[in-house]
Amino acid sequence: MSNDFEAAARPALADSQLRANMRHATHTIRDKRARVVAELDDWEQLREAGRRIKDRTMRHLHVHLATLEESVVRAGGQVHWARDAGEANRIVGELIASTGANEVVKVKSMATDEIGLNAALEGRGITAIETDLAELIVQLSHDRSSHILVPAIHRNRGEIRELFRRELPGTAGLTDEPAQLAEAARRHLRRKFLSARVAISGANFAVAETGTICVVESEGNGRMCTTLPHTLITVMGIEKVLPRFADLGVMLQLLPRSSTAERMNPYSSLWTGVTPGDGPRAFHLVLLDAGRSATLADQIGREALNCIRCSACLNVCPVYERTGGHAYESTYPGPIGAILTPQLSEFRSGTSLPWASSLCGACYEVCPVKIDIPTILVHLRGRVTREVPNSGDPGEAQAMRMLARVFASRSRYERAQRVARAISRPFVRDGRIARRLPGPLARWQTVRDLPAPAPETFREWWRERERAERRKAERP
Amino acid sequence: MSARETILGRIRVALVDVPVAEPATWDELQDDDDAARYNRSGDDNPQAVADLFAERCGAYSARVTRVARDGAALRRAIEAACRRHGTASLVIPTDLPENWRPTGIECQPDHPRLSLRRLDGAGGALTGCALAIAETGTIVLDGGAGQGRRALTLLPDLHICVVRERQIVASVPEAIEQLGDTVRESGGPLTLISGPSATSDIELQRVEGVHGPRRLEVVIVT
């Protein structure tokens, strides 16, 4: 096990303000979610339908991608395939360059964050402007997102006011009222929307049958980006495809209620290629692999690709609530990030994340498509230990081998119990091992609460009882 | 090998465990397991459906007005909506029904096509809709009759939308079924609108209105 997450989580755990913010935020959203979910009497059936739609789609992904390509082209769009992040960035960069634009507006998108598109475009002299309010805050402050849905959840209003005053022209008299801060962003971005020639978006869903792309959002920046510019470029992970238009009838119920805890998000934009007289004249769809096909090859791990990025699992996770999103050092934090990050990177990063969980299972319970996150976490712990060089602690591996020998024989097991009882005695207080253990055991102990070995084991008690019975029987 | 061939090839190899005969698509109509039998249709009482839509749409802080099937009453409701927001001029799609046009308010049809600057400066937009969803309080635009292009209802700060009761469906799956037919026939863009533009990005405090119209007025006609 590597210690990256443990180390990265330390500053967050020491920051009591951040922990209070995160606790407030996650609890607010999770309570609201529970209310709107309780309103639907068929919620469990919807989740099951969502799971089956996604499962089946992944099991035949190549078929649906080929259909999607055909449908998009038929509707007047162009389709590009990208094996990895570098190829996707190159394709997008060249498409923008061919329009002559040096500034593009962007809708919040996880996929473009994952591939580092903004930095790649900057290298070509193209400025990408984030238009989601929280993404704008993160971009202006050269920060990183800490939540899938509300990336600036770790910032308070005072910090945002200072940032806007510094970065946005004409905001000297700005107060820290959220409505005023939103108004400042509106004025700043309205100019950009009206002049932008190219927009970049992600996709929540892409319907293979019709070639329709769907983006859900709240602020209207998504509508602006997908409507006003001449050229629209959408970058989507290949796992976002849905076979049939009818599948949206399930997904558009599951996603908003799980994500923003609303019956429906304010705006959903669905477009099919290009429409003369309404919206962009050119539409490009970039289909991104970047580790998805490799993830698909793991029959247990592939379920992680079913994720619809609602972030409900972040809001219920006891680990995420305490560490915040930055400790995961990934575009995808929280429980879903812990199973996506190592797999999408083909175990080059995030290999400590499968351990960033207490396996309590709350994430599985709220997941709108029923991804069994705890099972995948355990599965990935095994894969990391077996496949990633130097990932296991050699001492721990040695200890586990010894334990296996001990457990294999009754006499060794019973002897070990007696030894443990004797040597643990000096460390026990109130029935628990309370004093610091010596040597390498100390590190192991810091994250575990251990009961003292029982003064008498069940086997000892049983033998004693048998002996007493026998004595009673022998006595006349 | 092209990127396309590489990716499709990798996927095929990754899915060797999937039986060849398995259908590629899950179909709720073919699956007889109750576990996945979600409600595909809602209440079929039109009055109850219209009432639910009015309540749910209003819950998003959209202003909802209901009028009887009457040209004059509808016009008066639209005029009142304009007065509430101090709007003296509206942009309208070219095919907006004549008798919806409010008196005393300047109505500018989108023909010849208005520039984005002109739309940005407009006081409001008045349109119909393709359908509405009761359960979620959603209105849907598909660029069809009486709706115009998308920019029309996006740049002005006020959107007044007229919904006829018979356009309201009970549930999301019913709406998607109808919209699927539209997309397969015309391929036009769809916009689902549930209340005015909003954000909760700053300390999770809801602010009505960022980029889309900050005010939404819905007039339901019996």
Image (cartoon, coloured by chain):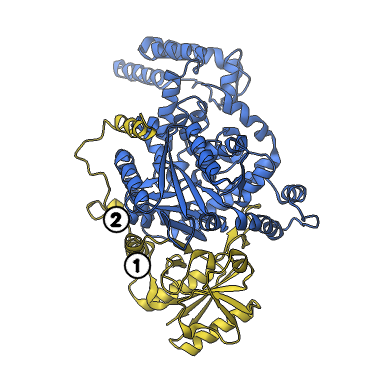
- The earlier-in-sequence mark between 2 and 1 is 2
The amino acid type of the residue labelled 2 equals Arg
The amino acid type of the residue labelled 1 equals Gly
Labels 2 and 1 within one chain: yes
Q: Residue at x 49, y 33 (%)?
A: A85
| Residue B200 shows in this picture | no
Which structural element holds mark 1? loop
Q: CA distance from mark 2 to mark 1?
A: 13 Å
Q: Quadrant of residue B186?
A: bottom left
Q: Position of residue B1 (x, y in %)?
A: 35, 28
| Chain label for disc 1 | B
Q: Residue furthest left?
A: B21
| Chain label for disc 2 | B
Q: Which residue is mark 2?
A: B37
Asked if marks 2 and 1 touch (Cβ < 8 Å), the reply is no
**Among the chains, which one is yellow?**
B
Q: Position of residue A330 (x, y in %)?
A: 55, 34
Rendered image: mark on residue A213: none
Q: Position of residue B163 (x, y in %)?
A: 45, 76
Q: Quadrant of residue B182?
A: bottom left
Say if A338 sits above or below B43 in the image: above
Q: Quadrant of residue A186?
A: bottom right
Say if A407 sits above or below B92 in the image: above
| Residue B9 shows in this picture | yes
Write down the colour of chain A: blue
Q: Which residue is mark 1?
A: B42
